[in-house]
Image (cartoon, rainbow, N blue to C red):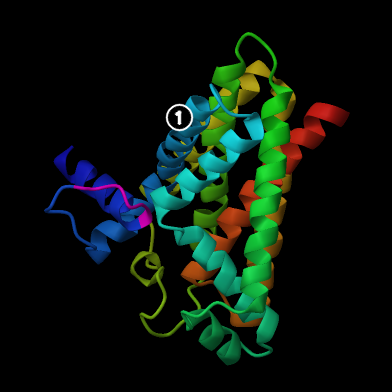
Amino acid sequence: MKKELHIFFTCLMFYTRIPCPKNIDHNPEYLNKATRYFPFIGWIVGSISFLTFYLFSFFLSTETAVIFAIITSVLTTGAFHEDGFADVCDGFGGGWTKEKILIIMKDSAIGAYGAIGLVLLFLLKFKLLSEGILLFTTDNAHLLIFLLFISAHSLSRLAAISIIFTHKYSRDDASSKSKPIANKHSWKEVFGAFFFGLIPLLALAFFQYKILFAIIPVFLTRYFLARYFQKWIDGYTGDCLGATQQVCEVIYYLSILFLWKFI
């Protein structure tokens, strides 16, 4: 139990800015095992984001409360995944060879593709999440909105981390943020990731079964992104995982809206 807690806190420290016990470090062995808890981090980030939305919604509009919820999620993770998304936009937008793409993604400066990509990403998150929240007008509205938040964060993280289970790490050095977690994985990592990644979605689908079908477009997006990364850089990097999480989160919100309105 003590070891599992150490692994969990290692995961929490690596993927968020939430304070952890002083004895926790970036031990590569624990980081590799921490992938089992990565979708569970989505529970935490989603819960904090929802709490922010809930509190601000008492005296502000739904749209404004959503903005504060998005800001909170960014602050909680330190823009970890948004940074990866911006780097992928710059790398794949400006590079035409594997070497050039990897060099651009490693550069800490943000380019035009990254800046434009982030603006469009946040606009989509704001609009889709706002519309998604307005769908829930039942007596269980707050519970459904809470499940919407955590399922979006957990399922998108599952989609991202699953790439590690099926594809190879692209870089030959340790220059990417995912290098410590790019080693072999046991069934515990796979089972833990899928368990924590799917539970919130199943809970939300309990109230409206058709929401369960949102997993299809999310994992189709994951498939095509992984295929695209494989084609251009022969695998993935930490930035690719961050970009996958962000894109799949947006696709999830879009899928919820489509399923609710048209199915």
Please state the horizontal and vertical placement of residue 77, each as a whole percent of the image.
41, 52
Q: Which residues are magenta?
A: 15-20
Q: Which residue is mark 1?
A: 51
Q: Residue at x 71, y 50 (%)?
A: 124
Q: State which quarter of the image contains the N terminus.
A: top left
Left or right relative to 213: residue 106: left
Q: Residue furthest top?
A: 139
Q: Residue furthest front?
A: 59
Please state the horizontal and vertical placement of residue 60, each as a whole percent of the image.
58, 28
Say whether residue 96 is visible: yes
Image: 89 above or below 200: below
Please state the horizontal and vertical placement of residue 187, each as a whole percent of the image.
40, 49
**Residue 16 lies within the magenta run:** yes
Of 140 and 233, the residue lying toward us? 140
Please state the horizontal and vertical placement of residue 138, each as a whole percent of the image.
68, 12
**Residue 138 lies within the magenta run:** no
Left or right relative to 182: residue 64: right
Dot 1, crowdedness within 10 Å: few (<14), some or many (≥20)? some
